[in-house]
Amino acid sequence: MINYITSNKQYSELREIMEKINDYIRWGNRKSLSDDLIKVRLQDQYNNCRRALETVASFHEIDVQKQILSSGPLKIIKKWTKKTIRKMIVWYLQDIAEQQTQFNVKSVETFIEQQNLLELLMRENMELKENFIKLSNDIHSEDAVTDQWNAAFSYEYCSSKEQMQKRYLKYFKDKKRVVDLRCGRGEFIELLTKQGIHCVGIDKNKKVLEEALEKKLKVKNYDCIEYLSSLKKESMDGIFACQVLERLSVNQRIQLFELAYEKLSFGGIFVFESENPPALGVFNDSLYMDPFRFAPVHPNTLKFIALQTGFRLQEICYIDECSKDCKFEITSDMSEGVKAGFKKLNQLIYGAKKFYFVCIKGEDNA
């Protein structure tokens, strides 16, 4: 409390001196004030004021935002300084503010454009989705009709494949995981199952799978390339494809061979059967009679694809020769030249209707 009173007293004295100095400066009475008095009194009061302010500051917080009041010339100078500073700030910030305004306008315009574009894309996406659903329904409807007609044609003109496919059992007797691509009614799957070989049949025609399902055979409704793509690498020991390649495009054939090689384990076997176009009679018989086959594939073409893929060709066999009743008769009274000519014609026209390749995946692949 004593310190506070002392400080107040010192502050009063300092204030009295400062008011006298202020009056002196304001009215120009410099001569009435002794230089010695100014020096002595100011030095003493400065020291006293400093101690007083330190005492007051010890229990008073300083408000840095508090406005400092002034009067006289100082007040005029202060106002002029404030105005000048404000004008300079406005002048400095005006260009920045204009740039910011332009940026804001452009940002809003861009946002509106993007919003309109997004709405347009959403509308187009909805239209595409509706068209896709419609097209998908049309395709499924078309596939259903095709499947039905394909199944009916198979029952009418294609006899049971069981006897014909028995020749392939020997190639899969020691295999554990085999897939039959386009298994149809499941004739070969049934043969493999009876031999205790784990196998699965694949066919995208639901109609022809009905008989296999009735026999409780393991079959799945898949496209052959789609199914092979879903398998893990080297997960199969054997792949069988009968009358498949002539139903695929060129790119699909190449893709089928690449997938077969990728999915077979070391030593795995790939056996495929196809119509034999070098025998011209096949065009008049079964090849073009089946409306669901796209184009025949020459055996040399398939040999090239198999070797390029990495397979080793273990065996190439030509089967299902035409009966003698279909061929040109060669009699003993014919000259050797005529006989040779008829033999070539018989081979060219009535040669083997089909062929099959046995391909192996191994270190010594050609």
Image: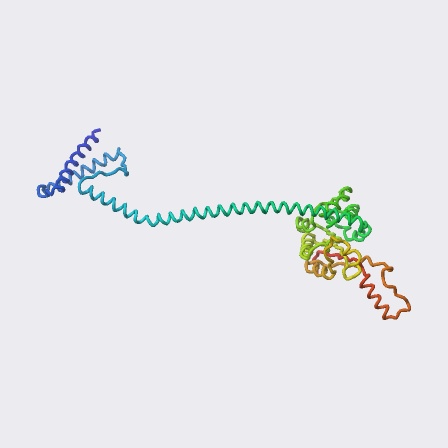
Tell me if residue 348 comes above or below residue 24 in the rendering: below
Quarter where residue 329 is shown: bottom right
* Residue 298 picture location, percent across and down: 74, 60
Tell me if residue 311 comes above or below residue 125 in the rendering: below
Compared across the picture, whether 29 is left or right of 257 comes to left
Compared across the picture, whether 131 is left or right of 344 comes to left
The tally of labels here is 0
Residue in view at x 85 percent, y 62 percent: 327
- Quadrant where the image shows the N terminus: top left
- Quadrant where the image shows the C terminus: bottom right
> Is residue 202 something one can see in this rendering?
no
Name the one closer to the observer, 252 or 235: 252
Color theme of the render: rainbow
Name the one closer to the observer, 72 or 11: 72
* Residue 244 picture location, percent across and down: 73, 53
* Residue 353 picture location, percent across and down: 80, 58
* Residue 179 picture location, percent across and down: 73, 49
Residue in view at x 66 percent, y 45 percent: 137
> Is residue 101 something one can see in this rendering?
yes
Name the one closer to the observer, 315 or 80: 80
Tell me if residue 80 comes above or below residue 337 in the rendering: above
